[in-house]
Amino acid sequence: MKSILTLIIVNKVYLKNHEEIELIRESSLIVSKTLGMLAAEIKPGVNGLELDKLANTFIRDHGGIPGFLGLYDFPNTLCISPNSEVVHGIPNKKPFENGDIVSIDCGVLKNGFYGDHAYTFPVGEINTQTKKLLKITKESLYIGISKFNKNNRVGDLSYSIQKHNEDNGFGVVRELVGHGIGNSMHEGPEIPNYGKRGKGKKFKNGMVIAIEPMINQGTHKIKQLSDGWTITTLDKLPSAHYEHNVALINGKPQLLSTFRYIYESLGIKSNEEIPFLKN
Ligand code: MG
Ligand code: MG
């Protein structure tokens, strides 16, 4: 799987100072607002290419550059991965249908720093089992974020995400991982969604990472389509993906990205981010 193996090209960990973290926050927030804008547009009959165009314009209007476009030769602004597609889907003209889920991953570059986060949207009314997949995957993201503190190592975070999903009968994708983020979209450390407690790199103040569980309703096994990008589940069952950018400040995790613009668009009330906000 060429594109997977070559995605993490820098594995060095760069600790960021206050100014650098604020610049990453600025880029992350443009992604957050982009996802919030898209949330209002996602409905049956709309297609991914239409969303891609909207996102490209929106990002540039907000002073950013689409971070995925051209990165490793990716052809679009957004990765749009419906239903059994896990990640790295290329936007196309196939209309979304009632009952679909659509994972949208978006990157922005501004002032030399990247933001990168993702959300899985239901289209219209989705079935109970898929609702549970979205709920548990997103819960595991926040469980993982809570483990990003000065007392822990990568394995503690990874294990917590794996456990929550596997306890609920879901498959945890192994081949794709979260990552450090900064001047590069992908820096060290790698943040797998499975692992062993007490193992891996120790977390330090100034680390900024993208935590991104990719969780399958069935088998954890995946395959890559012949377009060289799209990753799908092997059993064709649905897959969900949520991603936040998080900085370690004074020993504790602080969110740089937010889903609040999505929730405002969709009329959802949530207090999930409160423990991780800037204070
Ligand atoms: Mg992403
Ligand atoms: Mg990422």
Image: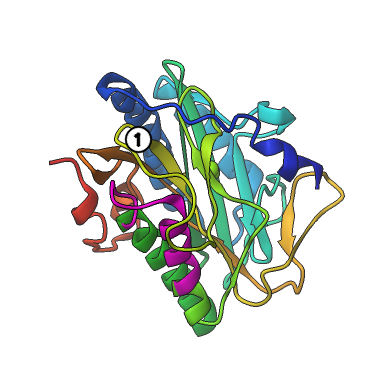
Residue, x 56% and y 43% (percent of image)?
51
Q: Which residue is at the front of the view, 4 or 273?
A: 4
Task: Pick out the residue farthest to the top.
Answer: 111
Q: Is residue 175 magenta?
A: no
Query: Horizontal and vertical percent for residue 205?
Result: 29, 35
In the image as oriented, which residue stretches furthest toward the left?
279
Residue underneath mark 1: 29
For label 1, the SS is: helix
* Residue 263 appears left or right of 156: left
Q: Is residue 183 above or below residue 155?
A: above
- The picture places residue 87, in percent across and down from the top left corner, at 64, 52
Front residue of 150/247: it is: 150
| Residue 111 left/right relative to 190 | left
Tell me residue 135's x, y (percent).
42, 71
Tell me: residue 14, above or below residue 243: above
Q: Residues within 10 Å of mark 1 (few under 14, many from 20)?
A: many
Which residue is at 24% across, 63% downward? 269
Q: Can residue 240 be seen by looking at this rendering?
A: yes
Position of residue 250 measured from the top left corner of the image (x, y, whole percent): 20, 38
Residue 127 in sight here: no
Q: Is residue 12 above or below residue 117?
A: above
- Answer whether residue 153 is magenta in the image: yes
- Residue at image point 80% right, 42% down: 2
- The answer to which quarter of the image holds residue 214 is bottom right
In the image, what residue type sits under mark 1? Leu
Q: Nearer the viewer, residue 17 or 268?
A: 17
- The magenta stretch is 147-163
Could you tell me which residue is drawn at 37 percent across and 43 percent down? Answer: 203
